[in-house]
Amino acid sequence: MQKVRVRFAPSPTGYLHVGGARTALYNYLYAKRNGGEFILRIEDTDEARSTEESLKMVIHDLKWLGLTWDEGPHPETLEDMGPVGPYKQSRRQDIYQDVAQELLQQGKAYYCFMTDAEIEEQKKAAEVAGTHAHVQSPYESWSLEKALEHKNKGNKAVVRFKTRALKKDYVLQDLVRGEVSFPSDMVGDFVLLRSDGMPVYNFCCVVDDHLMKISHILRAEEHLSNSLRQMMIYEGMGWTLPQFGHISLVLDEDRQKMSKRRGATSCFQFKEDGYLPEAILNFIALLGWSHPEGKEIVSVEEMKNTFSVDRLNSSGAVFDRVKLKWMNAQYLRALSDEALWAHTEPFLKKAGLSLPYGDTKWAYQSLQTFKTYMETFMDAVPFYASLDDSKFEKWSELLFSHSGDTFTEAEFMKMQDDVKNATGAKGKNLFQAVRVAVIGKPHGTELKLLVPLMTKNSLIHRAKATLKKLG
């Protein structure tokens, strides 16, 4: 039997969003379940948007999720590792040119010299006639010799794949959707190489998948429309078709396709917001796949042992942020005190909180108080802000230096600004901490309304009591 080889092929145009992460996860799990290999290929032919910095972003996210690949760019050096590289499409141009030439020599492709204006005129005529808006190129019948002679005179041409003689239905046995049939006249003669010589997506994809010996392709439903063109190229080259599985779309709360353009959250942002990678993987795995026993909390190790394509769902899955937070909370609270503090401490330091970080006993005791209220590590910041004595010390200092016996609303607001400027604290990190000192709880009536009703001595007494409690 053919060895299982799957691939994840992102375009490096920014951080990895959740839909791409789910595709990577399913391919990774399929490879692990079947003793196969997981290949990372970089589709960077979009020169305007693809950058090395974006590639590093994608690799950072995959590493954070723990989705290691067997072949592809090295996670540190970005150099190729594996026997069938290069693994970046931008470095495979000679390969695409050779395959295009082979199709031209066999008469399965041709040079087309039509201008944009001529193509647009054909499209308008087709719309009026109510027929397929397929290009009817007068150059399809030209011999290769005649086309090359014309091209060598400086005339620009694209390379098109011939489809008009392919009068049949193409049937795809989809691993997720079952039998899918495509009439050949769904597409006209489509472009393989643009006039500047750059290959188009469908052509690159087929060439790379064949030469990299990809056996199974699990990809998003949106790529189903690409299948007919790709099947035609496989047939034209006499290559074996891999097994395809088109997984459901990830939908946002409005049941619209979740995408980068619609503001889909990146994995990097989830990391910054204090989510655990294990929780993210668990959550996105269940967006289109179900555990054989219906479990909600599933470790990556258990996914590797139970993943199968027959449990992939073809219906769209809604990205429920409330459920994601709940799931993250389950993983967070299952951590040991040591691990939980190791994850939480960087968020507290980043927020500029002044706390006894070196006191392990204090740290673990504080976690027992707060972790039942935490769904992400970021949630810890406002809780621990109430323990930050630097704000209280500055606030107490300003109370002592005030000349009157009471405060006006304007005087209190200025004092708050002075504390903010002196400590760098702001928002909930500042106001909730002061509120705890004044009224003993983080929520209630606005302080600017309460403080003018209190005396300076009363406020000083409360500040001292708070500082004493903090040690």
Image: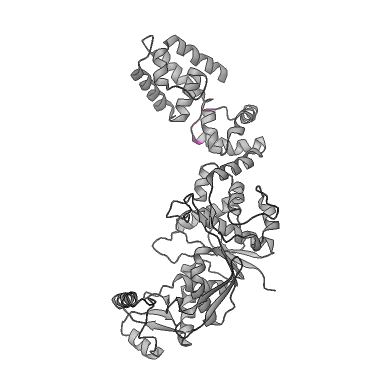
Residue shown at 42% from the left, 22% from the top? 446
Q: Quadrant of residue 41?
A: bottom right
Q: Is residue 339 above or below residue 180?
A: above
Among the 4 quarters of the image, the one containing residue 161: bottom left
Q: Which of 265 and 194 lies nearest the eye of the viewer?
A: 265
Lateral position of residue 307 relative to residue 456, left or right: right
**Dominant SS in magenta:** loop
Residue 42 seen anywhere in this rendered image of the structure: no
Pick whichever, 444 or 86, lies toward us.
444
Check if residue 131 falls in the magenta segment. Answer: no
Residue 173, how many percent across, how many down?
Answer: 60, 72
Q: Give the camera-side residue of 66 and 406.
A: 406
Q: Image quarter for residue 375?
A: top right
Q: Residue at x 32, y 77 (%)?
A: 119
User: Is 213 positioned to the left or the right of 224 in the image?
Assistant: right
Q: Is residue 186 above or below residue 310?
A: below
Report x, y in % for residue 367. 62, 31
Residue 147 image offset from top left, x and y in percent: 37, 87
- The quarter of the image holding the C terminus is top right
Position in image of residue 58 (x %, y %) = 51, 55
Q: Is residue 412 above or below residue 336?
A: above
Which residues, given as a range, are shown in magenta? 350-355
